[in-house]
Image: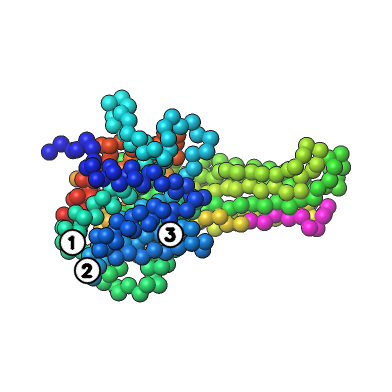
Amino acid sequence: MSPASSPSAAGLDWAQRLLRFNTVSRESNLPLIECIADHLRTLGVPLRLSYDDSRRKANLYATLGAGKPGGVILSGHTDTVPWDGQAWTVDPLGAELRTVAGEPRLYGRGSADMKGFVGLVVAQTQAFLEADLPQALHYAFSYDEEVGCFGARTLLADLAESGLPTSAVPRLCIVGEPTLMVPAIAHKGVARWRCCVKGRAAHSSQTPIAVNAIEAAARMVARLADMADAFRDRGPRYEGFEVPYTTAAVGVIEGGIADNVVPEDCRFHYEFRALPGSDVAAMQRQVEDHAATLLPAMQAVDAATGIRFEPLCAIPPFEAARDDPAVQLALQLTGGNSTTLVGFGTEAGLFQGAGIASVVCGPGSITQAHQADEYVSLAQLARAEAFLHALGRRA
């Protein structure tokens, strides 16, 4: 039988419904979560909501087949990146269908990353329930993945505190990030910091009595660039990744108030995207050690100057063997024999760290994610829906 070229009407409807919610990470995701929760409640599915400190955002954890053995988690995040300044030709919240070069596509922010997958899962609920699953299925829909996987940490902590019996703890997790429906068995970790440099302001004609925060920050940025070069030229390699070595990058820098004022403050954000098995703490120590070499000259002018670091996020790497049970399940459900590695971070490492065997496999391509006119092809959604149908027959 040839694969379907389009998902079911119900699957497409749910994907479009979720795309129309603005869940950029700076916004609340509660309207979307309540939409899904209301649907699940009408079907009698028990669920838990776990909130962030502001209670503006929530995770949803639902169990189909409560009381049955642990089973499989279907995991997806509900937040998206913003589209400010991007040159969209469609409404980012419009969930518009277009055919380009003969390929039917669903457009919208989060279509590939990853509301298409979440919508298909929700649409499949009735069929899952009617399948009389021998094991439980669980939905784990999180907030704030895009800014540091914060929601998944809250969700896992909430589950740990809920006192689930050992038999009810899920055994496997499928994270539906866009992999073109090829199971991904590894990704890098992501660790980010903010570096805050405190200098001493003065008129720019009096530089000897000042400490230029931007210049000190520039020396720190140069050190990070040197580290990135060393990772590329002499560091460990992991073939199969698009970029097969650890990377370092500076993403944001702010400082100064006027051309004729030596700047007192400068802040920049940087990250390491580290290969599995890397010692990120040692990388950060290199950065802090370099900062320490700058302090004597700064504090000789003003003892109140300094450099401090604030951790922003730490997304663990993910690595699974081909014979891992989650990977084997994904291969069976796709009917393929190939696996891949992905360069982007996911929640898979968190689930794996909680003792749940994990794999990353979902519709669409990361090439379309975070871009203007983000889309997922209907053929990819159809492949993901077939994957879920197969799961319902096997779970």
Q: Which residue is mark 1?
A: 133
Q: Earlier in the sequence, mark 1 or mark 2?
A: 2
Say if mark 3 contacts mark 1, CB within 8 Å. no
Say if 151 sits above or below 107 in the image: below
Q: Residue 295, relative to residue 203: is it above or below?
A: below
Q: Residues within 10 Å of mark 1 (few under 14, many from 20)?
A: some
Amino acid residing under circle 3: Ala
Where is residue 251? Give x, y as percent. 57, 43
Q: Which mark is residue 58?
A: 3
Mark 3 or 1: in front is 3
Task: Decide which of 322, 314 is in the foreground and name it.
Answer: 314
Q: Which amino acid type corresponds to the residue marked 2 in the rendered image?
A: Lys
Please name whichever residue, 1 or 11, is drawn nearer the observer in this view of the structure. Answer: 11
Residue carrying label 2: 68
Give the residue type at disc 1. Answer: Leu
* Label 3 residue SS: strand
Q: Is residue 303 magenta?
A: yes
Decide if residue 147 is in sight here. yes
Q: Are circles 1 and 2 on residues that touch, CB within 8 Å?
A: yes
How far across and down, in percent of the image, does residue 144 sit? 46, 54
Label 1: which secondary element: loop
Mark nearest the camera among 2 and 3 is: 3
Instruction: Please state if 20 lies on the left or on the right of 262 as rendered.
Output: left
Q: Report the number of numbered marks.
A: 3
- What range of the chain is rendered magenta? 301-309
Along the line of sight, the residue nearer the viewer: 280 or 55: 55
Query: Which residue is painted at 33% across and 42% down in the image?
Result: 16
Distance from label 3 to label 1 (Cα)?
27 Å
Which of the marked residues, 3 or 1, is nearer the chain's N terminus? 3
Q: Residue 306: x percent and y percent? A: 73, 55
Magenta span includes 16:
no
Disc 1 from disc 2: Cα separation: 9 Å
